[in-house]
């Protein structure tokens, strides 16, 4: 599996790696080993999909598992182990629920609480964490956008930040609020140099201290996506905040406050205006959604 892992690591982010590997291992186990999987045809793959359906998986989970199978056969084709891809054109009709649960979004008070989190006893981490919570709340960045930021993306004198284009969102330049400028100045001038100076152990998963990445770990390594949720939720007994829902809440509150739809689209980096319109909902619709999700008879 090492060669497969190297293939996945070369094409996909570390955040996606474990999920794709899990999907592939699950498929190989069901097929009875890699030998049989290599020679499987379209009917064999459909048989596996039908077996998955018996588990009454959510459509999104089913789609992800099938996508993992496709990646596996791309790997076989790219490495010359197989000439054809048996399920390249396989499309599932299971509808994935992509609706925004506006009745479950955070309030303005909740977002204010998020900004107060991130306290750490370790040197340099409190300043870094406050930068992260600010980016989640004030700019509504996704986790992947936060960890991808480079030091050159910050213009403190101009009071703005550049967010690079990603697979899901467009590039954009967003203003920083005064408290963020102060937090970023402290982090860039004191905390980040301190973190980059920490000793590190060279190994298969560690790289030399990164001088380009904006946000780094306590050992000077590029910050992982998984760390963001732990930073936002340092205490398991407190209310849990999801980074994606923080972003959704900020976007929804901007629309509720009367901001122009196109302006909010640019702010969020949405490629389609329909993605932004999904956050619009009148009071009657919000009430109906809340009843449907929380009424005991539903």
Image (tube, rainbow, N blue to C red):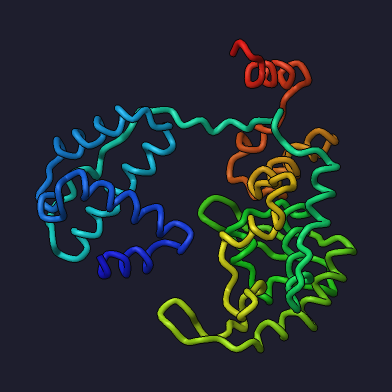
Q: Quadrant of residue 95?
A: top left
* Quarter the C terminus occupies: top right
Residue at left 68%, top 41%? 248
Residue at left 51%, top 54%? 167
Residue reaching furthest front?
A: 237
Q: As displayed, is residue 66 above or below residue 279?
A: below
Q: Name the foreground residue: 66 vs 129.
A: 129
Q: Quadrant of residue 130?
A: bottom right
Residue reaching furthest right?
A: 178
State left or right for residue 220 relative to residue 203: right
Residue at left 75%, top 16%? 284
Residue reaching furthest top?
A: 297
Q: As displayed, is residue 91 above or below residue 225?
A: above
How far from the left and from the top, in percent, is residue 288?
69, 16
Q: As displayed, is residue 225 above or below residue 249?
A: below
Residue at left 56%, top 59%? 226
Q: As displayed, is residue 198 above or below residue 68?
A: below
Number of callouts in the render? 0
Q: Is residue 260 visible?
A: no
How far from the left and from the top, in percent, is residue 151?
68, 76
* Quarter the N terminus occupies: bottom left
Q: Is residue 24 visible?
A: yes
How far from the left and from the top, in percent, is residue 170?
60, 54
How far from the left and from the top, in percent, is residue 46?
20, 34
Q: Name the foreground residue: 64 vs 200.
A: 200
Q: Quadrant of residue 18?
A: bottom left
State left or right for residue 29 relative to residue 263: left
């Amino acid at each position: 599996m090492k060669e497969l892992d190297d293939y996945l690591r070369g094409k996909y982010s570390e955040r996606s790696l474990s999920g794709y590997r899990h999907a592939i291992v699950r498929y190989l186990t069901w097929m009875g080993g890699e030998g049989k999987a290599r020679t499987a045809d379209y009917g064999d793959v459909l048989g596996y999909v039908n077996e998955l359906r018996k588990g009454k998986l959510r459509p999104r989970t089913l789609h992800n598992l099938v996508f993992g199978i496709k990646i596996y056969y791309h790997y076989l084709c790219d490495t010359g182990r197989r000439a054809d891809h048996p399920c390249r054109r396989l499309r599932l009709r299971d509808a994935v629920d992509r609706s925004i649960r506006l009745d479950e979004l955070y309030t303005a008070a909740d977002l204010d609480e998020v900004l107060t989190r991130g306290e750490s006893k370790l040197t340099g981490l409190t300043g870094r964490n406050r930068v992260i919570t600010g980016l989640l709340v004030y700019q509504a960045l996704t986790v992947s956008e936060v960890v991808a930021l480079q030091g050159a993306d910050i213009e403190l004198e101009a009071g703005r930040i550049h967010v690079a284009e990603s697979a899901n969102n467009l590039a954009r330049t967003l203003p920083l609020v005064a408290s963020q400028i102060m937090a970023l100045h402290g982090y860039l001038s004191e905390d980040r140099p301190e973190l980059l100076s920490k000793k590190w152990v060279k190994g298969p998963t560690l790289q030399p201290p990164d001088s380009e990445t904006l946000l780094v770990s306590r050992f000077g390594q590029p910050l992982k996506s998984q760390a963001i949720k732990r930073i936002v939720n340092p205490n398991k007994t407190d209310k849990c905040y999801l980074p994606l829902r923080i972003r959704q809440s900020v976007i929804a509150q901007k629309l509720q406050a009367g901001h122009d739809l196109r302006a909010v689209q640019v702010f969020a980096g949405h490629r389609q205006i329909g993605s932004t319109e999904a956050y619009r909902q009148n009071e009657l619709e919000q009430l109906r959604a809340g009843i449907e999700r929380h009424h005991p008879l539903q």
